[in-house]
Amino acid sequence: DIQMTQSPSAMSASVGDRVTITCRASQGISNHLAWYQRRPGKVPKRLIYDASNLESGAPSRFSGSGSGTEFTLTISSLQPEDFATYYCLQHNIYPRTFGQGTKVEIK
Amino acid sequence: EVQLVESGGGLVQPGGSLRLSCDASGFTFSDHNMDWVRQAPGKGLEWVGRTRDKTNSYTTEYAASVKGRFTISRDDSKNSLYLQMNSLKTEDTALYYCVGLIDDIWGQGTMVTVSS
């Protein structure tokens, strides 16, 4: 199975901060990676697909990059509604695997 | 409105069985591959498995942690997805989501608790 390792596991940030989350795959997955946001009490919502494509309706402050084994999710200016847990998901091969999550908390 | 509604969760003893159902509406269910994803209390998301559509012969894929114990099936005539869970373990305790991952369609989840 492909292991997806996210870093950091948790972070504290302030409104307006630039935030970067990294996801590393244990083997190459091309650009077959998605990023999800999970707010408390809500179902996960996809923000980015195919590593760098912004999901329709997702705010433009979210961006994704990377290919192969290293990927990043960037929030250019953190907003109050962005405090949540973020997950990467590889969909290159089966079984699909999620990263362990990155919890973004208010500083 | 696109909707997925899960049912069938509950409390079951270790070694027991449970069948989850998911009713779909608002989209052409038969055209979609469908997944189950779970989240254990205090843990992250875990992909459980997938059933492909009729075009792809309804073939299935599973996570190693459930392979041989869980079976995913579907009934396109009823717009329904199923997860048959056998030989349940305490570590299967989780909120189970019915998901159309390709189109990012999620149900609200149904809770399964495995405990004696």
Image (cartoon, grey):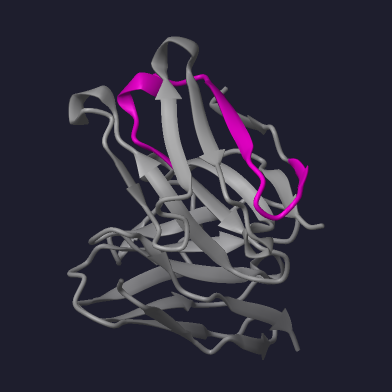
Q: Quadrant of the N terminus of chain B?
A: top right
Residue B115 is situated, as x and y percent measured from the top left of the image, at 78, 57
Does residue A15 appear in this view? no
Residue nearest the viewer, comparing A63 with A3: A3
Q: Which residues are magenta?
A: B10-35
Does residue B32 appear in this view? yes
Residue A40 vertical position relative to residue A55 in the rendered view, above or below: below
Residue nearest the viewer, comparing B35 with A61: B35
Q: Is residue B89 left or right of residue B83?
A: right
Whether the magenta-drawn stretch holds residue B24 is answered as: yes
Whether the magenta-drawn stretch holds residue B110 is answered as: no
The extreme top residue here reads B77
Q: Residue at x 30, y 71 (%)?
A: A1
Report the number of discs: 0
Q: Residue at x 47, y 56 (%)?
A: B66
Q: Is residue B6 left or right of residue B2?
A: right
Which quadrant of the structure image shows residue B34?
A: top left
Residue A16 is situated, as x and y percent measured from the top left of the image, at 63, 81
Residue A5 vertical position relative to residue B81 in the rendered view, above or below: below
Q: Is residue B113 left or right of residue A17?
A: right
Residue A48 is situated, as x and y percent measured from the top left of the image, at 39, 60
Q: Residue at x 55, y 70 (%)?
A: A86
Residue B33 is situated, as x and y percent measured from the top left of the image, at 34, 35
